Structure formats: C-alpha cells, structure tokens
Image: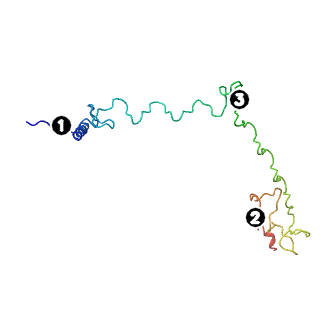
Amino acid sequence: MMAPRPVTTRQAYCETRLRAGLAGGRAVDDGTRLAGNRPGKPALAGNRTREPALASNRTREPTLTSHRTCRTALASNRTGKPALTSNRTCEPALTSNRTREPALTGNRTCEPALAGNRTCEPALTSNRPGKPALTGNRPGKPALTGNRTREPALAFDRTREPTLTSHRTCRTARASNRPG
C-alpha cells in the first residue's frame, strides 16, 4: 500500500475554502486559517495588526460640546485677573438701534410728503397760461355744460394714477351739444 502524499499549501487552501463553503460561508478555525499575511503559520490570536479597531471615541477631532467658543468666561486662562462674566469681548452686544442707518420713523427726508397739491408742478386750473380757461372744445361758441373732454378735473390729492371710481369718463353727457 502506498503512503499518503504530503499536503501542499495549495491543497490546504482548497480544503479551507471547501470547509468554508460547507460551514455557511465562514471558515473553520483549526489553527491553520490564513488570518493575516502569514501563509503556513498559525493564525494570529489577538487583533489584526493592519488597523487598530476604533473602539469608542475618535481622537482625530474633539467633540465641541461643553466648550464656550468666544471667550466668555476666561477664569482659568487669566491668572491674577478677575473672570470675564458678562459680555463677550469679540463683538459688542447689539441691543438697541443700528448705528449705520437712522431709524425710519416719520416722513422720509429725501421726498416731501404728498399731503395736498404737489409742489413741483402748479395746479392745473387752465391749460392756457395768460388766457381764460377753456370751458369746452369750441372756441367762439357757447360753452359745453357737460364734462370736459380734454382732462378730468384734478380735485385735491394729485396721485400718480387717478382712481376711476366715481368720476365720469370722457364724453358721457353730451345732450347739450345738440341744440334742438
């Protein structure tokens, strides 16, 4: 009878893979499992040496939870001086009005208040300076008693756009233009 052949590294690797498939995807640790980079030697018992496990706290960046950020109470860093307890020293507290712009409380000073007639233009009582006002569009003929057809009368407040609520528009009552 022939003696059994010695087990090679390739055969041991294939048997390990076969046992891993039979065990549900996990390799059976029999002391020859290749846990690290040591072929043919027993597995390392402790942690892997490639990367340490990050257990609880990460030490790269400290957590800024209880530290005050802007030098509010420097009791420990100022030896022989009283502690700063009230205001922050980097910026003053903005409590009242801003100082860059004045508060806009009343009328604006760049434009006059439009209470009555506007002062930039005179009141349009007549479109013909130095001549009597046109009561109608028929010079030399009797006046029209209805509405004026050129412009409606601007009563008190000259706004930018007149509100067309109760004023009659142009050419509404022309019963007097047809004598007889």
> To which quarter of the image does residue 155 belong?
bottom right
Q: Position of residue 56 (x, y in %)?
A: 46, 30
Looking at the image, residue 1 sits to the left or right of residue 7; the answer is: left
Q: Residue 135 versus residue 9: which sits nearer the camera? A: 9
Number of marks drawn: 3
- The span from disc 2 to disc 3 (Cα, nearest Å) is 69 Å
Q: Amino acid at mark 1?
A: Pro
Residue placed under numbered mark 2 in the picture: 169
Q: Viewer-nearest of labels 1 and 3?
A: 1
**Residue at position x 84%, y 54% in the image:** 116
Q: Are marks 2 and 1 in contact (CB under 8 Å)?
A: no
The one nearer the camera, 170 or 4, is 4
Q: Amino acid at mark 2?
A: Thr
Instruction: Judge from the rendering whether residue 125 lies leftward or rightward of residue 92; answer left or right.
Output: right
Q: Amino acid at mark 3?
A: Ser
Q: Residue furthest bottom?
A: 140
How many C-alpha atoms fall within 10 Å of the one at disc 3: few (<14), some, or many (≥20)? Answer: few
* Position of residue 127 measured from the top left corner of the image (x, y, whole percent): 85, 68
Location of residue 90 with respect to 76 vertically, above or below = below
Query: Residue 6 has which mark?
Result: 1
Q: Secondary structure at mark 1?
A: loop
Measuring 30% from the left and 36% from the top, which residue is drawn there?
34
The residue shown at (75%, 64%) is 169
Q: Earlier in the sequence, mark 2 or mark 3?
A: 3
- Whether the residues at callouts 2 and 3 have beta carbons within 8 Å, the answer is no
**Quarter-of-image position of residue 106:** top right
Q: Secondary structure at mark 2?
A: loop
